[in-house]
Amino acid sequence: MRDHIFFYLNGKPQRAAGRDAFQSVSRWLRYDKRETGTKIVCEEGDCGACTVLVGRREQGKIRYRAINSCIQFLFQMDGAQVVTVEGLAKNGELHPVQDAMVKAHGAQCGYCTPGFVVALAAMFEEGSRDARKALTGNLCRCTGYEPIIKAANECDASRIEPVDHRYPWPLELDDASREAVRIGNFFKPSTLEEAIQFKAAHPKCVIVQGATDFGVWCNKRGFVPESLLSLNAIEGLGDIAHDGDAIRVGGRVSLAMFEEFITREVPALAPIMDRFGSPQIKNAGTLAGNIANASPIADTLPFLYVAGARLELAGRDGKRVVPIESFYRGYKTLDLAADEIITAIVIPNIGETLRLYKISKRSHLDISSFTAAFHMQRTDGRIGSIRIAYGGVGPVVLRLPRTESFLAGKPFVRETFEEAGAIAREEITPIDDVRGSREFRLQLAENVLCKFFHDAGGAA
């Protein structure tokens, strides 16, 4: 078992031990390595000025993804390759993205520029040309987006060398990614059994995978965890695949991997995932983390509720399966024993009519005020069965059994859904908060039923 973190930075091996391993990646880059191209601004994953590329092996393939280094920690980099803006240039020659930014005058004050450059490099690494989507997580306070987009559009992609050609993958990173590591109160076990034993011995430990919330807690709230557990070395938890008539999502599958897979399988979920967060956030955060965070406004939960998703939990007494609805016992209260870990999310194939809705103050990159999911089967102009889940209207995401029961067997007409809206209002207990009033959410609970009716093919 190693007592240090091992990774590569711009093609060179690095080791971090002791207190150094608990620094944020951005601070280590700037203050320890003097790689000052990586900027620190918000330190909560919002602005993208600290964007770097992190390379890992995903289901057998090396993938370099953009992440916010301000809310990632060195201990998370074990077995990875980090590439900064300084690492994009080669032999003194600018990377084609950097060259295009110069020619298009894509920099004003320049403070945000390195993050934009790295995010665009990640876009080309993925074979995309959708610059607006790729730059969703990068903010320019000088309002210089037009020349930045111009630079992206005019960049000569044929000149871009893939990162794994620029930095051939060191096989020792594969070995490092599988090895167990223990540094102080941090443990990266190599087996699930070791992880379970550690969690049982440290019931207040924090499982850190994406750290998209954890990093903010540490940077902004001074959070100091009792102990930390990483699942990065445990085989199988990073896989997503078909499992019979369902989709099986491993416990450390990133939201980006989930989005890529689910877009083909469940197109109705794609717009919700697109609005979920920036590429940097989705590249780090995990579906299991979104579930375990237990927020009543988590964007994935209404879909998982109506899809009948099941959670596989592993503990000292073995494995058990819990329907996602039963997993939440109250606000931030889970049916999860101190020694248990979410190892997989199993999502049955979902057919017929599925519609998902998210209401937020901003269209993208904003926390939801209200969410809803509908899964309906229809026969001969009547509603055969329907599942409804609302978020942001109670301490947990709620199914609406009375509304569902009322709708089952009724004619598929607007009047039916208008009546159902009155019942839905009575099934929820929203509160006033900064994202909306109680009355606002009650009205949404009614209105979204009529919207679903029209979206599902209903006539006016």
Image (cartoon, rainbow, N blue to C red):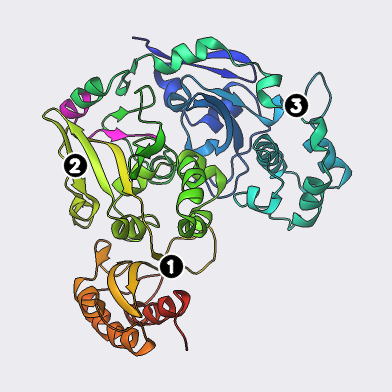
**Which residue is rendered at x = 69% and y = 45% of the image?**
112
Mark 1 neighbour density, 10 Å: few (under 14) some (14–19) many (20 or more): many
Question: Where's residue 114, x and y in %?
Answer: 70, 38
Say if residue 15 shows up in the picture. Answer: no
Numbered circle sitting on residue 380? none
Kind of residue at disc 2: Val
Q: What separation in Å lies between label 3 and label 2 (alpha carbons)?
A: 45 Å
> Of residues 110 and 61, which is closer to you in this image?
61
**Which residue is rendered at x = 38% and y = 13% of the image?**
179
Say if residue 303 shows up in the picture. Answer: yes
Mark 3, residue position:
161
Mark 2 neighbour density, 10 Å: few (under 14) some (14–19) many (20 or more): some
Q: Is residue 413 magenta?
A: no
Mark 1, residue position:
357
Question: Where's residue 238, x and y in %?
Answer: 40, 31
**Which residue is rendered at x = 35% and y = 82% of the image?**
412
Q: Quadrant of residue 336?
A: top left
Q: Quadrant of the N terminus?
A: top left
> Of residues 64 and 387, which is closer to you in this image?
387
Give the farthest residue toward the front. Answer: 380
Q: Which residues are magenta?
A: 198-209
> Of residues 356 and 205, which is closer to you in this image?
356
